[in-house]
Image (cartoon, rainbow, N blue to C red):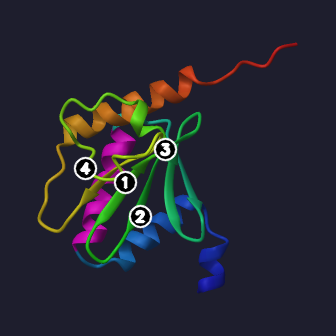
């Protein structure tokens, strides 16, 4: 079974991670994933660094790590994003990354999160350097 998972598509690996987390963390990761897909129907799901779900569009948007006490969504370029509703609550001191830690019983502001995802995609798109001939 482990070999089968190792050769699976990233979306299937994320499905398996959600299923394996048969508690609030799995439900939270599934909810966040649905919001990301709603915000950007063209998002690409990846599986990196030995088991971290990653969502990308013209570059990494965010990662979805799960810990015993939190689901952590790390935005690679979060420091460059507007966050008027103060979703970012972790990794606030870095020059590039920002994170959202969601703990058991906490609700994520869905519309604000969708706006943040869309802003991250827009930022990734503006940072692309076109190839010159």
Q: Say which residue label 2 marks.
A: 65
Question: Is tag 4's residue or tag 1's residue first in the polypeptide sequence?
Answer: 1
Secondary structure of residue under mark 1: strand
Identify the residue shown where x is 31% and y is 28%. Answer: 82
Vertical position of residue 40 compared to residue 128: above or below: below
Q: Say which residue label 3 marks.
A: 76
**Residue 99 as seen in the image, left or right of residue 8:** left
Label 3–label 1 contact, CB within 8 A = no
Secondary structure of residue under mark 3: loop
Gap in Å between the C-alphas at discs 2 and 1?
A: 6 Å
Whether residue 30 is in magenta: the answer is yes
Gap in Å between the C-alphas at discs 4 and 3?
A: 14 Å
Identify the residue shown where x is 38% and y is 28%. Answer: 119
x and y, in percent, of residue 59 in the image:
58, 38
Mainly helix, strand or loop, the magenta region? helix
Closer to us: 45 or 127: 127
Indicate the quadrant where residue 73 lies.
bottom left
Gap in Å between the C-alphas at discs 4 and 2?
A: 15 Å
x and y, in percent, of residue 12 in the image:
52, 65
Secondary structure of residue under mark 2: strand
Indicate the quadrant where residue 31 lies.
bottom left
Question: Is tag 4's residue or tag 3's residue first in the polypeptide sequence?
Answer: 3
Label 2–label 1 contact, CB within 8 A = yes
Vertical position of residue 9 compared to residue 115: above or below: below
Residues drawn in magenta: 24-38
Question: Is tag 2's residue or tag 3's residue first in the polypeptide sequence?
Answer: 2
Closer to us: 80 or 38: 80
Question: Is tag 2's residue or tag 1's residue first in the polypeptide sequence?
Answer: 2
Label 2–label 3 contact, CB within 8 A = no
Identify the residue shown where x is 48% and y is 40%. Answer: 96
Q: Say which residue label 4 marks.
A: 89
């Amino acid at each position: 079974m482990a070999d089968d998972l190792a050769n699976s598509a990233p979306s299937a690996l994320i499905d398996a991670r959600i299923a394996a987390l048969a508690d609030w963390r799995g439900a939270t990761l599934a909810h966040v994933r649905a919001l990301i897909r709603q915000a950007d129907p063209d998002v690409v799901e990846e599986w990196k660094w030995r088991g971290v779900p990653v969502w990308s569009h013209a570059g990494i948007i965010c990662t979805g790590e799960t810990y015993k006490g939190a689901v952590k969504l790390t935005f690679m370029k979060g420091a460059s994003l507007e966050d008027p509703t103060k979703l970012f609550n972790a990794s606030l001191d870095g020059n590039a990354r920002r994170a959202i830690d969601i703990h058991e019983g906490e609700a994520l502001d869905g519309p604000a999160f969708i706006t943040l995802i869309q802003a991250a995609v827009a930022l990734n798109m503006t940072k692309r350097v076109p190839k010159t001939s």
